Amino acid sequence: MTMKFNYTLLGVLCLVSASFWGQNEEDALRFSNTDLQGTARYASMGGAFGSLGADISVLSVNPAGMGRYKSDVLSGTLNLGVGNTAATLNGEETITNSENFDLNNLGIIGVSNTRVDNPSPWRKVQFGFAYNRLAEFNDKYTINGNNDASFSYVLADRGYGRTPDEIYGNDRHYSSLAYENYLIDHVVDSSQQWYVTQMHNDYGGGITHEHTVETSGRIGESAFSIAGNYSDKLYLGATVGVDKIRFDRTKTHFEAANSDSLEIDNYTFIENLSTRGNGVNLKVGAIVLPQPWLRLGLALHTPTNYYYMRDTWNSEIRTNFKNGDNYGEKSNSSSYVYKMRTPGRVIGSLAFVAKKFGLLSVDCEYVNYGNALLRNHQNSGDSYDFNYENSISGQIYQPTLNIRVGGEYKITNYLMARAGYALNGQPFKGEYKDQATPKTKYSLGLGFRSEQFYIDLAVVHSQQKENYFLYDPILIENTVQTKKWTNGLVTLGFKI
């Protein structure tokens, strides 16, 4: 077919040199920014459990809390969540709804009592295993609006200075795919090579954008724990955490020309990314009862060393022209193996307990997101050192404090009412956070305890604002997303 090209891209645009598909500082933050959902009791009290115990969640927070168990227990939690994301692009707001249903945790605790004739002050030893979900990635959002520039500018610029054969070898998921489907075309002038796009805005009217992102997956931790009780005054515990990452994302970017003078009508760019990872960490903790009404807790989490990470990705472009011609092609999948280390954590806790009335608990967690690191894997096939990505993490991410507060009131000896609040600190440094806000959570719950079983219910509402750029921020403004989630949790536990 014959085409007319009227827009030429000269030079290299800033901030598009990094690959879109991953292994960058964005991935390091995504998998470092965990937020344990826990049991219904844990969630209803804002997660303030670092100096408490007798809850499956504490195996992934402060394993010393497992020492508070006096009998064998089996426990599990189901979680139903509904949410919406409001995104604004150039003054146009789009609201997208989503939902998920999953297993938050499942665990079993065994208690070994010392013999009556044993004078040792070690009263009990607990062994436990639990699966705890540390992060949830199920989400969907859509962004609609008009913009003067096009994502195809970025695709054209990625081919700058290279022949079509060279971009096929070096950029086959992006600029090469755009070239093969007539979204961009190759130009040679005075030994300089660049690419031009059909989707330009020389005639005005803007370009309609519709951008949808669907994500799924989780970070799940298998916690293998041991704890001990010394004279009912000191509790010590340790957990070996085996973490698994499962993350899948599909981005669908649609653009339509608002000018009758252009030959192209619309195009769709689809990008798929799948990440799998395996890691290990160690958690140790202590709880001290200096007074019957006072509990102090301290927990240290080592960095999680993901000794194996694999990204697999592909992309697809479909183009439709006003004369009826249409094209479409999907790239073959590529993959890359690497390593990652997410930052460690320190958790200090304080609780006031009145056995007849209830308790009040506070946790303060320190984590430095700038310490996240990407590393080369011996099976990657190259020697890339990730120095650039790691330096960027140090520049834009900062240490932060996560604050959790919770209370429990005894209505009767068997029925409890609970409430909580949590504030997850902002990982971005001030000059980079723009309109992003910390994540806040408000929670309420009820619990029933009997001699043989217990049931806990919780409702948690969370919200935060995030920044999102559809593509190069030189070409398009920041899209501010307001995310709101409401989760209902139910935990069943049995003494066995």
Image: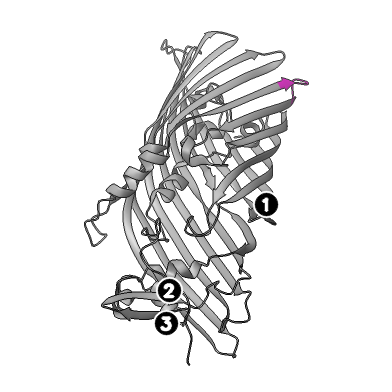
Q: Which mark is residue 86?
A: 1
- Residue sitting at the far top: 291
Query: Which type of secondary structure does the marked residue at label 2 adopt?
Result: loop
Amino acid at the residue labelled 2: Thr
Disc 3 or 1, which lies upstream in sequence? 1
Amino acid at the residue labelled 1: Ala
Q: Which mark is residue 8?
A: 2
Q: Is residue 261 above or below residue 294?
A: below
Query: Which type of secondary structure does the marked residue at label 3 adopt?
Result: helix
Q: Is residue 394 above or below residue 261?
A: above
Residue at mark 3: 180
Residue 71 image position (x, y, % from top left): 56, 27
- Say whether residue 342 is visible: no
Q: In whole angstroms, how far apart are the C-alphas of marks 2 and 3? A: 18 Å
Residue 10 image position (x, y, % from top left): 38, 68
Q: Is residue 124 above or below residue 421?
A: above
Residue 226 image position (x, y, % from top left): 43, 30
The magenta-colored residue range is 409-416
Q: Is residue 389 left or right of residue 473?
A: left
Residue 410 falls inside the magenta stretch: yes
